[in-house]
């Protein structure tokens, strides 16, 4: 195993000799945006690693996931189904942000009443 039990200073020197440089980056939070959600890392530990012309980042922290439901999407569902903000947002979350599915879901729910 590489570096098992090795002094961190020795490990850093050895990595530099192999052309691998690492730099700690001070960050308050890291946000990773995807189509469906945002992954937010609070209190992150971020290290930038440069090796053979490639740059990569090692990140750890307290994870929080936020679903990406826009105000506009909620408004559309509210207008089409005549429901309040809370019900429209809940339906969009249940249907993974799919507006058409959320509208159909709420319309079906109303027809049961």
Image (cartoon, rainbow, N blue to C red):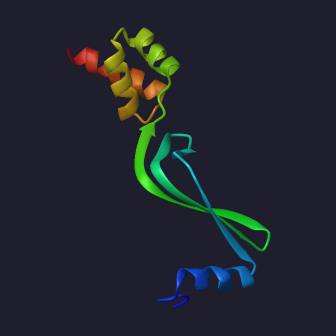
To which quarter of the image does residue 35 belong? top right
Residue extending furthest toward the right: 53
Asked whether, in this view, residue 112 is left or right of residue 57, the answer is left
Q: Residue at x 35, y 26 (%)?
A: 91
* Residue at x 33%, y 27% (from the top left corner): 90
Q: How many marks?
A: 0
Left or right: 85, with 54 as reference point: left
Q: Residue at x 51, y 45 (%)?
A: 29
Q: Nearer the viewer, residue 92 or 32?
A: 32
Q: Nearer the viewer, residue 35 or 98?
A: 35
Instruction: Reply above or below: 75 against 53.
Output: above
Q: Position of residue 37 (x, y in %)?
A: 49, 40
Q: Quadrant of residue 101?
A: top left
Q: Nearer the viewer, residue 90 or 66?
A: 66
User: Residue 56 in the image: x percent, y percent?
Assistant: 66, 63
User: Above or below — where is 34 with respect to 3?
Assistant: above
Q: Give percent across and percent down for residue 3.
A: 54, 87
Residue 13 quadrant? bottom right
Question: At 45% across and 50% down in the image, what residue appears?
Answer: 43
């Amino acid at each position: 195993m590489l570096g098992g039990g090795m002094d961190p200073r020795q490990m850093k020197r050895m990595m530099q000799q192999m052309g691998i440089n690492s730099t700690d980056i001070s960050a308050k939070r890291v946000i990773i945006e995807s189509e469906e959600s945002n992954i937010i890392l609070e209190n992150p530990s971020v290290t930038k690693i440069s090796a053979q012309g490639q740059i990569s980042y090692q990140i750890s922290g307290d994870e929080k996931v936020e679903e990406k439901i826009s105000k506009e999407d909620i408004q559309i569902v509210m207008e089409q189904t005549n429901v309040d903000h809370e019900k429209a947002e809940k339906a969009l979350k249940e249907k993974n942000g799919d507006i058409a599915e959320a509208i159909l879901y709420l319309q079906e729910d109303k027809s049961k009443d």
